[in-house]
Image: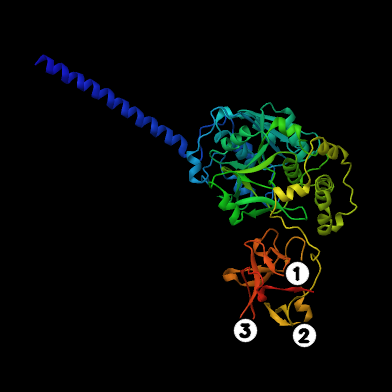
Amino acid sequence: TVRYVRMRLYRLRVGAIVLAAVVLVVVLIVIINLLSSGTGKEPPGAALNLNFDESAYIRGALKDPSDPYKKNAFNQDKSDSIPSDRNIPDTRHSQCKHQSYNEHLPPTSVIICFHNEARSTLLRTVASVLQRSPTHLIQEIILIDDASDDVNDGLFLTQLPKVKLLRNDNREGLVRSRVKGVTFSVAKVVTFLDSHCECNVGWLEPLLQRVMEDRTIIASPIIDVISKDTFEYLGASADLQGGFDWGMTFRWDTLTPHQIAKRKSPIEPIRSPVIAGGLFAVNKERFEETGKYDLAMDIWGAENLEISFRTWMCGGSLEIVPCSRVGHVFRDRHPYSFPKGNGETYTKNTLRTVEVWLDEYKTFYYQKVPYAMGRDYGNIQERIDMRERLQCKSFKWYLSNVYPDQRIPKDTDNKPGHLKQGVMCLAVLSSRVTMYNCEAETKTEQVWTFTSDGKLKHSNLCLTLLLGNKLSLLACQPGNNEQGWEYGNEGQVILVHPNMCLDREGAMLEMRVQPCSRGKASQIWKLV
């Protein structure tokens, strides 16, 4: 009997130990899931200084009481009403929540330049970095005040953890301010942000992981949209890459079906020919080795194209990392002044980029922007010498290997003409795109122009694809794939994305796009 009791007690003790172990494992699993699920404030970062008076800071901002859009080109009243720790939707792909990252990621110096930024948006930018980043991965947040009217815009924020301030006595612009921040920084990785952003949950680790894996990579997040009117946070498409037209204007290109099919996973980094330029992480040493920025560029404009071409052509690469999401307030105009004028400054910066990096392809820029010919862009010899020293590749290599989908202008570009099939010509009659006798008196209704930026224009309108493969004339829009046409070598008029051809259909001569069919008579056009 005693032996039986002892055996029962032994079994009970073993059972209790096993049960305790199971409970401990379950608790650990729950904790891990909570930490990885993401709520908009996780993983935990540094709390804001409890002595920081957010309301007083925002109330002290300069603003125009008669027009909330005047000073910042967004609704400042709405922005000022939103707290710095607001919840925003987690816009990442669901697979991102289960990604793991190296335990020894390098910390980063976050560099934010601003000039007369609204205090509420600047505060939310800084607060989102602190609140949605692992504390040990933020070495410092360096604010560069580019001669704002009120020194306290940045000075008061130094009460927050890890925030440091540098101030320019005179207006220097984005390029020189960022380089100043890099020089002051101490981390091995620098991360640039604009001053009207909100970092989302888990934004930092994916960027640092890619830079750690390959020091030649510049890693950019997917840039979500913060409405300039309501400040609603909206997720952006993950199927985009950066591009440009031959006027050197940045645009977003939709990934082609072929590019999407090649991706192994929806969260795989996207190789991007160009980055938007406002938000990215880069190895500091690599950034300095490969020319930093062109310090002769003024204020803002074209610096993203210059660093993009230079990175690719000089042995690096650009990536958009889908598991990193950062919201950005996009505006319709620049709220700040350019000492030499917006157009003049942007043209100078663009010319420096074109003359250093585009080689023989710069002729396409001058065809698109003829007024830039002969404009002063300063001395570029130092940048040319740097390109030679780094043994950078040609722009032809860049187009062939990095941006093969970029349309190269042809001899037919910007030359008005008629598109003929036999005795019939493509025409516009009563706003309807159709066919009409080429010998008719209404020849002006039959004049079309292939433009150097890939449009097919009639007068000042562009041929546009509508639903149901139908066509119409609408206002021309940069980067609109439904307006992207080219004249093929075999006489086809091709809608580049998604590679469809202009076709006439039936006795009513309806114009549509159809899958391209080599030799099909209704798809062959003679440009005269």
Q: Residue at the far left: name it.
A: 1
Other-residue count near label 2 (Cα within 10 Å), few / some / many at <14 / 14–19 / ≥20: few
Foreground: disc 1 or disc 3? 3
Q: Which residue is mark 1?
A: 460
Whole-angstrom CA distance, mark 2 to mark 3, is 19 Å
State the quadrant of the N terminus. top left
Q: Of residues 217 and 185, which is closer to you in this image?
A: 217
Residue 183 is situated, as x and y percent measured from the top left of the image, at 74, 29
**Residue 516 visible:** yes
Estimate the x, y position of residue 39 in percent, counting from the top left: 48, 40
Q: How is the image coloured?
A: rainbow
| Quadrant housing residue 108 | top right
Mark sitting earlier along the chain (1/2): 2
Q: From this viewpoint, which residue is outermost toward the front?
A: 519
* Residue 135, horizontal then vertical, whole percent: 56, 29
Which label sits in the foreground, 1 or 2? 2
Question: Which mark is first along the chain, 3 or 2?
Answer: 2
Q: Is residue 476 above or below residue 302?
A: below
Element class at badge 2? loop
Q: Tell me the tag on residue 507.
A: 3
Kind of residue indicated by mark 1: Asn
